[in-house]
Structure formats: structure tokens, C-alpha cells
Image (cartoon, helix red, strand yellow):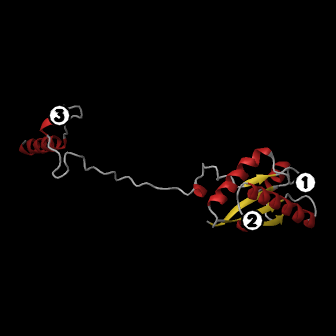
């Protein structure tokens, strides 16, 4: 009996030690008039923010206007469609404000057509985007235009959706 009484006592003591005060227990009110400001501050607060300010490079912002870096073209076409003008304009203006930045415009095609034809078409696509970047403020010395033709497909496949993904000019930043 003494053994069971001591086990009960130990269990009750352990439960009492684990108890906590309820969260809704009211605290004593604080009289703000009695709280003194820190010494040598003239009553001004000395609290400083510990949150670091991070400046994100516009080229690294996945939601920024420079996130889109491809201009897509129609079949056998090398004119920049109206819907891609904002992409070209944003990159051209960015290059204008950063004269040390270097880019490469890479012209690409789908697999239809001869190798030579596709290299020529990819070159026309790269050149037209490069020219428009210049019109938007970039310097010719900042831009290199190359053609990869059908050699660097973005999408594998032999259907219209894959072809459409591969008919493009990509803007690649080389030196920021």
C-alpha cells in the first residue's frame, strides 16, 4: 500500500510540475507614464530594424519585366509580332541604362527546311531582334547576333506545338 501511495504521489507531483498557466490569464496593466525612456536619447526611441534590405537584380526577378527572354515567330517568318514588342522594349531600355552589359541574341528555327535555310532564317530572326533592341536604346557594341538554326530545339517533338516553341530568338545575358 505504501508503494502504491508513493507512486500516486510521484505521478501527481509530475503532473503538477508540467502544468502551465492558461493563455488567457490577464496581465497587470502597465502605466506608460512611469516607464522611463532610455538614457542619453532625449526621449527618442533607439529601436533599429534588424530586417535586411535585399536589392534584387532586375535580371533575376522571375516576375519582372525582364523575365521573358524569348521572342517567338510564325512559320517561315522573321518579323517581331506586336505581342513581343514589350519584351524587346524592356530589354532595350535595360541595356541603355547598363552600357557594360553584353548580350547574345540567338536565332532558332524548327526542324523543317534545309540546314542552310534554317541557319539563314535563324540569322534573320536574331538580326531583327538585335536591330529593335538598338532602336529601344541598346548600343550595337552590346549585342552579338548568332544563328543556331534547328540545332538547339527548346521542345522535342514533331508537331506544331514543338515547332512553335523552336521558332524563336533568345536573349542571353553574357556580361552583366
The residue under label 2 is 140
Q: CA distance from mark 3 to mark 1?
A: 76 Å
Quarter of the image that includes the N terminus: top left
Q: Secondary structure at mark 2?
A: helix
Disc 2 vs disc 1: which is toward the camera?
2
Residue 27 - label: 3
Q: Nearer the viewer, residue 19 or 82?
A: 82
Give whichever of discs 3 and 1 has the lower sequence position. 3
Q: Is residue 17 left or right of residue 98?
A: left
Residue 79 horizontal/vertical position (percent): 85, 51
Looking at the image, which residue is at 82% across and 65% down? Answer: 147
Quadrant housing residue 148? bottom right
Tag count in the figure? 3
Residue 158 locus on image (x, y percent): 85, 54
Residue 55 visible to an observer of this rendering: yes
Q: Quadrant of the C terminus?
A: bottom right
Q: Nearer the viewer, residue 121 or 87?
A: 87
User: What's the residue at 81%, 47% (across, down)?
Assistant: 81
Crowd tier of the residue under label 1, counting other residues whose Cα lies within 10 Å: few below 14, some 14–19, many 20 or above: some
Q: Give left or right: position of 42 versus 57.
A: left
Residue depth check, mark 2 versus mark 3: number of the one nearer the observer: 2
Mark 2 vs mark 3: which is more N-terminal?
A: 3
Q: State the image coordinates of residue 173 (x, y, percent, origin top left).
A: 67, 64
Which quadrant of the figure has residue 132? bottom right
| Label ID, residue 76 | 1
The reply to whether discs 2 and 3 touch (Cβ–Cβ < 8 Å) is: no
Q: CA distance from mark 2 to mark 1?
A: 26 Å
Point out residue 7 in the picture as x, y percentages from the top left corner: 12, 44
Q: Quadrant of residue 101?
A: bottom right
Label 3: how many Cα within 10 Å (few below 14, some 14–19, many 20+): few
Quote the CA–CA distance across marks 2 and 3: 70 Å
Amino acid at each position: 500500500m505504501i508503494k502504491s501511495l508513493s507512486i500516486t504521489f510521484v505521478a501527481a507531483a509530475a503532473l503538477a510540475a508540467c502544468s502551465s498557466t492558461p493563455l488567457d490569464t490577464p496581465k497587470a496593466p502597465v502605466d506608460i507614464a512611469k516607464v522611463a525612456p532610455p538614457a542619453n536619447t532625449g526621449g527618442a526611441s533607439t529601436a533599429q530594424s534588424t530586417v535586411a534590405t535585399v536589392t534584387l537584380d532586375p535580371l533575376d526577378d522571375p516576375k519582372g519585366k525582364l523575365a521573358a527572354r524569348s521572342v517567338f515567330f510564325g512559320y517561315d517568318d522573321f518579323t517581331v509580332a506586336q505581342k513581343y514588342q514589350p519584351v524587346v522594349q524592356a530589354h532595350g531600355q535595360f541595356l541603355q541604362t547598363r552600357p557594360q552589359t553584353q548580350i547574345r541574341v540567338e536565332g532558332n528555327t524548327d526542324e523543317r527546311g534545309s540546314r542552310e535555310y534554317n541557319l539563314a532564317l535563324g540569322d534573320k530572326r536574331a538580326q531583327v531582334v538585335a536591330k529593335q533592341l538598338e532602336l529601344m536604346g541598346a548600343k550595337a557594341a552590346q549585342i552579338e547576333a548568332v544563328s543556331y538554326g534547328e540545332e538547339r530545339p527548346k521542345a522535342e517533338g514533331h508537331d506544331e506545338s514543338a515547332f512553335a516553341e523552336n521558332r524563336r530568338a533568345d536573349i542571353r545575358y553574357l556580361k552583366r
